[in-house]
Image (cartoon, grey):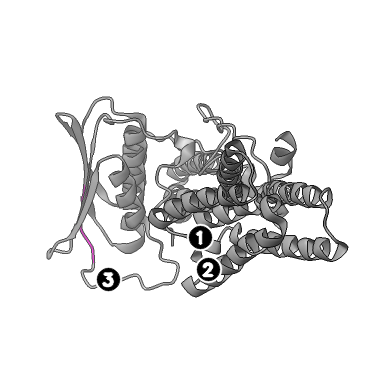
Amino acid sequence: MKQGGSRSSGTNGADNGEAAEGGTTAGPGAGTGPGARKPSPLPDLPAPRLAGTILKVALLGYLSITLINLASAAHTTLSLGACAVALLLVFLLQMRHSSAHAHLAPTWQKALTLSAQALLTYLPLALFHSQWGAMAGFLAGSVLLLLPPRVAWPAYGVVGLSMSLPPLADGYPLREMFYLSLSTLLTGLVVFGLSRLSALVHALHDTRLELSRMAVTQERLRFARDLHDLLGYSLSAITLKSELIHRLVPTHPRRAMDEVSELLEISRQSLADVRAVASGLRAMSLKQELGSAQSLLEAADVRVETDIRFGTVDQQVDTVLAAVLREAVTNLLRHTRATTCRMEAVQEGDRVRLSMTNDGVDPAYRDVSPHSGSGLGNLAARLQAISGRLSVERLPDRSFHLVAEAPTRLLRPLPDLDDDPYAEDSVA
């Protein structure tokens, strides 16, 4: 089967480009960072064309043996010609019955083709006797392929038992009756098994191709989502710092130089974020993000109050909560005229709660731009993946309240960071 495994990525129709693209993707977000999980080896299976070829060769082999047996007996040229035509018709009918979707055909079509095969199985027995008995194995296989199981197996047994009658009529001993019946049943199982194997190989290759396409799509979603979560915050910070520096240069050049230093640090962090997204390394620290958010908000003339009381949390929980904070700060800077902001990160038992409250929100505000993003929706899905939850509330006093809760330790291990456990949410 080595040949089939090597052909599976290239011989399956016009799938070369897509299969090659998908085949090199081990899964959603497969990266090259530390801890990246190696893809499990795929089983070495025959290509769909090879599986179909094996089925055709097996059927032609049975037909050839029957034809050789008939040719070795005393038959006229006319009868042998009729035999060859009948064998060809049986082969064509069997190929139709062995196709992957033959069982889905309308009932009248299945009844018509099965009846035709039954006639081609039993009528030539009057001329060729037991030498034609091998064709009953094809009929037994077709019965198993097309009929419901509760009907197929009894009918399969009836076809096998019926082949004990020709040897009896020809005066052959009992062992010949047993041999022909048993060979009919075994041939039926071979036809049924090879037909089902061919259909399963086709389905497996189609599924493998679809999984590859899904992996590529999920990786694109992961990349777009992380760019939104990471760079939206950084670009907002760069814009605010640049505006502040522009105001400070004429009157406070020394403070402007300090702000330039911070701007450079944010730019470097943005570059690191881009590299992290590309490589699949997306670990962030909530404590570091709290400090960075406080500095950024103060630069935007927002009075900040903080309450930070939590210990060590799981790395994936830490990353998700840090992403929540980044998105909340980005929304504050883009959509509000806040003057005060209170950030809390408090651990209570085995759960950690991140909350952020700010004023200056317009209750009637709705972002109707076509590229407004879906940051909070993404974050809610991320928190749900770690058994957490996200709640947001716009209060009548023009304040906005966001709360994110998550366990400090995951009860079950999630996939590695570069396996993207959040592949199911959508990205605007």
Look at the numbered disc 1 and give the secondary structure of its residue. Answer: helix
Q: Is residue 79 left or right of residue 382?
A: right
- Label of residue 110 in the image: 2
Which of the marked residues, 2 or 3, is nearer the chain's N terminus? 2
**Is disc 1 in contact with disc 2, using a CB cutoff of under 8 Å?**
yes
Q: Residue at x 22, y 29 (%)?
A: 310
Mark 2 element type: helix
Residue 365's disc is: 3
Residue 385 can be seen, yes or no: yes
Query: Mark 2 belongs to which amino acid?
Result: Lys
* Amino acid under disc 1: Leu
Earlier along the polypeptide chain: callout 1 or callout 3?
1
Label 1: few (<14), some or many (≥20) within 10 Å? many
Disc 1 from disc 3: Cα separation: 62 Å
Q: Position of residue 349 (x, y in %)?
A: 14, 29
Label 1, on which residue? Answer: 146
**Mark 3: few, some, or many residues within 10 Å (few <14, many ≥20)?**
few
Q: Residue at x 30, y 39 (%)?
A: 386
Q: Secondary structure at mark 3?
A: loop
Q: Which of the two discs, 1 and 2, labels the residue nearer the N terminus?
A: 2
Q: Amino acid at mark 3?
A: Tyr
Image quarter where the C terminus lies is bottom left
Residue 357 on the magenta segment: yes
Which disc is residue 396 wearing? none
| Magenta region | 356-361
Is 238 in the magenta?
no
Where residue 158 sits: x, y (%)?
A: 48, 52
Relative to 175, say whether 367 is above or below: below
Q: Comparing marks 1 and 3, which lies closer to the viewer? A: 1
